[in-house]
Image (cartoon, helix red, strand yellow):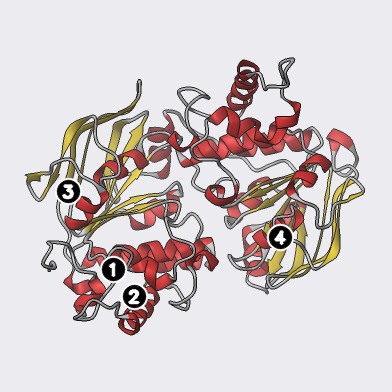
Amino acid sequence: MTDHAGRAEPAVQREQGLQALTGADYEARAVSKSFDSVTVLHDVTVHFYRGEIHSVIGENGAGKSTLLRILAGMFPATAGELVLDGKVLPALTPRDAQRHGVYLVPQEPRLMPDLSVAENLYLGALPRHRFGAVAWRRMIGTTDELITSVGLRADPRLPAGRLSLAQQQLLECARALSHGCGTIFFDEPTSPLTARDAERLFELMWQMRDQGLTLGFISHRLDEIEAVSDRITVLRDGSVVARAERGSYTRENLVTAMIGRALTISRRSRPAAGAGAAGPGAVMLDVDELVAPPEVSGMSVRVRAGEVVGLAGLVGSGRTEFAEALFGIHRPASGTVTVNGRDITGASPRKCIDAGLIYLAEDRGRNGIFADVDIARNATSAIVGQLPRTAGSFIRPRKEQEIARAAALEVDVRASSVAAAMKTLSGGNQQKALLARWMLAKPLVAIFDEPTRGVDIGAKESIYATIESLAASGLAALVISSELEELVRICDRVYSVYEGRVTGELAGEAVTLEALGQLAVGA
């Protein structure tokens, strides 16, 4: 159903709900895409059928997100064509794609933080009364119904910027339905979600599939790919290298196709008691009864030189808010924070960096990257005062690029040049570029908040190796992760966090999935 202008009506206005939506057979046919002189997609053909979930997988930089953005009208293809229900489409804009019932749920939520949940849901299509006034009461009611259907519990009048990252992602999923789209692509939608929220999303996706919608899905979590996919296409270096249907592959097959080699994953060797490289040394981060209302209610944590210590807990337990209070993004109400014996309680981020504390944020879009700035300046932004300068005190660009290039190479950032804008990188390569930034600062203590969110399995091992190497050189690392397997893989000790408090601690071989699972839910 469309309005008089030919635009798809929001699904919630139809009152038939999800049942009224229909998907379409949608094909990318021999599609290629180049940015400047760099080709990121090579002659890619992928067919998405109604009534199934088709996953596209591959390493960071393989071209997955670029492909979905072309399908959703966000990027034009350099070559090839898009075919919807047998008809070749002209060049698309995102609005054109939505008119054709196509929507992309992005990896990083695209919301207007000062507008309400309801206004974000209906952005560009506010329901109105006969004489043009916005139908606020109806909008609030239908918003509440729709966000509840995707598992989001929030006041429709609440500013969207006050939602957690997980809640914002659920709101993006609701927006796809509100625009009446039956062909929906999900780009890493579960990255910020708890296992419970992710399961709720999968249930919604299965319901959509069974009702005839067309779904495309990207995830780096292979257990999710195995759980939801009816078909899989594997990209490597911008080309299709494998295709598979449910039941016709193993996880090892997929990994080998993705990275071009077999991958061995090993658990970190726990250091023996002692000092220096042989084991944990002096206490480098000492947090005593930190309170930062309303999320942090009194948390105490210690991390020694050479240790990798984890924080486990559900989304909303206060882990990220605790990290932000340590780093001065939010000022704590009470408690103390010391780094190598130096009191930095309530210090600004700049002073924290000067004291040797750095923070790799969970939400790199909000607290991490400078999207329109080149990779070199992103990488060197933490050490601007230390960069080589001319006699007139101007930064020497060539030296800055040399420093950034060496740091990017060390953590395997894949880019055409460090002069490229940060926004041209895939999510995983952005994360590695941020890691390069903080390593240039030569920290004593590093907080890694969801360090592998949106990162493929090969890049994960690279990041794990970097963290372990830094710990071996004496860094004190605090790792926050929603993936319990990640904490078991790399941590020497793990604190559990529940409702803003530390509820338990595990060390050494006691760090297991079963034990962490119980502690994370407050047991």
Check disc 2 and report its element: helix, strand or loop: helix
Rendered view: 175 above or below 237: below
Check disc 4 and report its element: helix, strand or loop: loop
In space, the residues marked 4 and 2 are separated at their CA atoms by 33 Å
Identify the mark at residue 146; answer none if there is no mark: 2
Instruction: Identify the amino acid type marked 2.
Output: Leu
* Number of residues whose C-alpha sits closer than 10 Å to that of mark 2, classed few (under 14), some (14–19) or many (20 or more): many
Identify the mark at residue 330; answer none if there is no mark: 4
Sooner in the amino-acid sequence: mark 2 or mark 3: 3
Foreground mark, 4 or 2? 4
In space, the residues marked 2 and 3 are separated at their CA atoms by 26 Å
Residue 461: image x %, image y %?
Answer: 57, 37
Rendered view: 267 above or below 442: below
Sooner in the amino-acid sequence: mark 1 or mark 4: 1
Q: Is residue 489 left or right of residue 290?
A: left
In space, the residues marked 1 and 3 are separated at their CA atoms by 21 Å
Task: Determine whether label 1 and label 4 are within 8 Å by CB.
Answer: no
Residue 267: image x %, image y %?
Answer: 65, 43
Q: Residue at x 65, y 18 (%)?
A: 396
